Image (cartoon, rainbow, N blue to C red):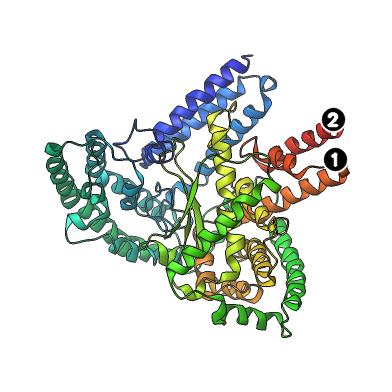
Amino acid sequence: MPHADELHALMQREWQYQLERSPVYTSLMMGDRRWNDRWDDRSLAGMEADHRHNVEVLEQLGRIERGADPLNYDLLRRDYETWRDEYACRLHLLPTSHLGWLPEYPRQFPAVATASQLAPELRFETSSDYEEWILRLERFRGYVDQIVDGMREGVREGVVHPRAVVDRIPPQIEKQLVTEARESDFYLPFTRFPVGVREGDRSRLAAAAERSIANGVLPALHHFLEFVVREYIPAAPEAVGFWQYPRGEETYAFLARKYTTTTLTPNEIHELGLSEVERLRTEMESVKAKAGFSGSLPAFFDFLRNDARFYFKTGDELVAHYRNLAKRIDPLLVKLFKTLQRQPYGVEPTPEAMAPNATTGFYVHGASDGSRPGVFLVNPYKLETRPRWQMVPLTLHEAVPGHHLQVSLAAELEGIPDFRRYGRQVAYSEGWALYCETLGDELGLYDDPYDKFGQLSFDMWRAIRLVVDTGLHTKQWSRRRAIDYSLENSPQAEYEVANEVDRYIAQPGQALAYKVGQLKIRELRRRAERTLGDRFDVREFHDAVLLGGPMPLDILERRIVAWIQEAGHD
């Protein structure tokens, strides 16, 4: 059978194939401009072709000897098996939701995205950059038509998001329907030109962009809005949950395996969530007592939700506090980490257009070529729902040592293939970020009991997700029941809770990854501590977890078990 050289050649070919098939991701996240004039091919025929391609790659892998490079072999096969099974579940017929109505924008999850917000993130340095953007604008209508075709097929097959999700979409589109092309975010690059664009070219490029937006982009947006209002919303079910769709239970079970990278069943995950909720309620009672609050836990939740001392008066104050937290955390990392990322990051407010439907904060990783740093976006919308006590764990999760450190380190690794450096394993990455929230104790950041309670409330939130997500999609929970259960067990504001529950409705299974991943990483650390005793070095353990890049939890466990054995023999 062919040996490792053929596997490595296949990995390289496939990475280039994936880049070409995802041109928006490629230009944004990789800084690779080869396909800057295109949108992703979201046509039904294109997705069918991708599916056939994925099946062919699996057949090629079957002819390659695994033993020559088992780790890369297993990781590549896992990706292609997942994509094959995902297509069979017809999930491509749900290309849009309130979390991002055009799916390629990098801030789409867990925020609201529009293709117009792509423009500020791209590099515009030469006339060619502007000309390629104009070509993208001219092709926008065809791209929207592909999205509509996919959604229409979803209507025919009975795969449509519930009303709770799709009712949120029209207001987002309407914000893009400006009266003048120059007011559109698509036009932003033409409001300021760099020195690399000649004066003589600027008026020509601006006029071409204005025509493309007026004659193509804005009519396409009107067309999309009309389709959503007249065809899609009337077809949307009032009930929520995947249980109601064709092969819904089977599909959700697949999504649970995909996102957790385990063999846990939805029912097992539900029971795990109930157990974690009870454990965390006990810890919350202890911290409540340390804060000097004598009332019940629900009364403490109300106090945390409503007392003015926990809230900022302006968005600028909120953002400044997050920036100060980041500056406080950065120099502490050497206590727990041997290897740190090189790429910088910033803390910025969530863009106004996406803020109403966005979560409290989230991370957008930088471009791999260094042209754009990582960004921790914090949401100043509805300040009365953004308490101080959640800020420390959120910064640990989204910035450092959470997402920014992990994602940047993976991209900076040498000696592993690109599909691993830039790949995303949700249970690994989100489990890591949730694990990092607990490191605030070791970093001395939870000296205030309210900050510690904030960490527990975030941990509780991820436990609640196990219960609510599975409840919605397998146990026929209503949206109201999911909101009420969340409010009973968490101090989060109802507005934030409703946004989160609608997220689980729109993206079933994804929210399961956080707690399952955290528990696995914590379990592996405890195993290492027990086995190695005084020889355990937390900085070496974190290197072992991070320096292999993202991977499924079962493969991560194999890696850590091998590291423990090796460390024990040093």
Residue 342 image position (x, y, % from top left) = 54, 39
For label 1, count other residues whose C-alpha is less than 10 Å away and answer few (under 14), some (14-19) or many (20+): few
User: Could you tell me which residue is drawn at 52 percent across and 65 percent down?
Assistant: 321
Circles 2 and 1 in contact, beta carbons < 8 Å: yes
Query: 352 or 147: which is nearer to us?
Result: 352
User: Could you tell me which residue is drawn at 66 percent across and 53 percent down?
Assistant: 436
- Label 2 sits on a secondary structure element that is loop
Quarter residue 357 falls in: bottom left
User: Could you tell me which residue is drawn at 51 percent across and 73 percent down?
Assistant: 385
Query: 311 or 490: which is nearer to us?
Result: 311
Q: Which residue is mark 2?
A: 570
Asked if residue 125 is positioned above or below residue 150 in the image, the reply reads above
Task: Point out which mark residue 367 bears.
Answer: none
Viewport quadrant of the N terminus = top right
The CA distance from mark 2 to mark 1 is 9 Å
- Label 1 sits on a secondary structure element that is helix
For label 2, count other residues whose C-alpha is less than 10 Å away and answer few (under 14), some (14-19) or many (20+): few
Residue 3 image position (x, y, % from top left) = 63, 15
Three-letter code for the amino acid on which mark 2 is drawn: Asp
Residue 68 image position (x, y, % from top left) = 67, 19
Three-letter code for the amino acid on which mark 1 is drawn: Arg
User: Could you tell me which residue is drawn at 61 percent across and 41 percent down?
Assistant: 340
- The residue lying furthest to the bottom in this view is 295
Viewport quadrant of the C terminus = top right
Apparent side of residue 114 relative to residue 4 in the rendered image (left or right): left
Q: Which residue is mark 1?
A: 535
Residue 530 image position (x, y, % from top left) = 87, 46
